[in-house]
Amino acid sequence: MNDNNPYQPPQADVKPPPVPVGNLTLLAEPRALSAGAGLSWLADSWALVKSNLVVWVLITLALFAIQFVLGIVPVVGDIVSSLIGPVLTGGILMGVRAITAGDALRFEHLFAGFKENFAPLLGLGALTLGIFILFGIIIGGAFVGMNMDLMQGELSRPEDLLSGVNTGLIAVGVILLLLVMMLFWFATQLVALNNVPVFQALSMSFKACLRNPLALIVYSLLLLLLLILGVIPLLLGLLVVVPWIFASMYVSYRQIFLK
């Protein structure tokens, strides 16, 4: 008996094809890795730093100088810093990609994001700024509301205010912050290196974080340890730790998203 139904609507594979990236391909779905991957991201990225250490130090010094200059400009400096943060980071990640392709890291890679994918990277910075402004308004409004309750006698003691903050506001704030971090964790890599649209990059980043919680926890704890060690010798260790972090950002993205 013939099972073909001439009236059945045609079926097609509507899943988008993988996006080629040089010799690598962007996966349609991010991989799920073991907890040990968090350690491998740092271990595998060290070679990308030590082979170009002098240029890395120059890039890091320039990055610190840019952030310092912007930091002394009230309000506007903070806004500009937030806007161009993904642009600068994207350029550095392009430099890491160049190293893995066998090319040399160049100082100009720091500004590569202004030439390639500038608009979406700037949009990512604007979105980040907007979310954290909204986040600040919500938290600030909650504090104002509790202060008003305290003044009106609804919260009779300061301890009541602190108790409310500890049990409610801090918990909600931490959860919201974690969700925001998950949205943006891999977003810059995807936009800068794969031309992924901003909102799609946010979705893919969130999904990748959901699939790799243990690896990200291990990685974050190791980063915290590295930052502490980098700060101890008069902040000089940051000249090595910061490039190492950028290199590990690329390695983690490559292990999760590329094949």
Image: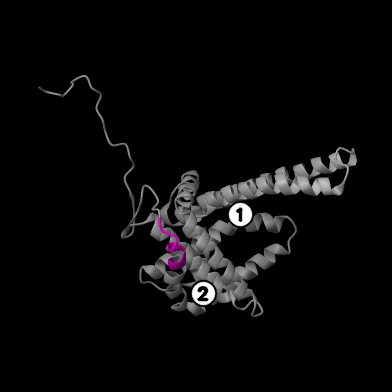
User: Magenta stretch: residue 35 in it?
Assistant: yes
Q: Which quarter of the figure has residue 2?
A: top left
Which numbered dot is residue 56?
Answer: 2
Q: Which residues are magenta?
A: 33-40
User: Magenta stretch: residue 211 in it?
Assistant: no
Q: Nearer the viewer, mark 2 or mark 1?
A: 2
Q: In the image, what residue occupies the spot 88% across and 42% down?
A: 156
Q: Secondary structure at mark 2?
A: helix
Q: In the image, what residue occupies the spot 40% across and 53% down?
A: 32
Q: Name the residue type under label 1.
A: Leu
Q: Badge 2: how crowded within 10 Å, few (<14), some, or many (20+)?
A: many
Which numbered dot is residue 83?
Answer: 1
Q: Where is residue 180 shown, x and y percent of the image?
A: 58, 49
Q: Badge 1: how crowded within 10 Å, few (<14), some, or many (20+)?
A: many
Quadrant including the C terminus: bottom left
Note whether 34 is above or below 11 in the view shown.
below
Q: In the image, what residue occupies the spot 58% across and 52% down?
A: 125
Q: Where is residue 184 shown, x and y percent of the image?
A: 54, 52
In the image: residue 65, left or right of residue 152: left
Q: Where is residue 195 shown, x and y percent of the image?
A: 43, 51
Colour setting: one colour
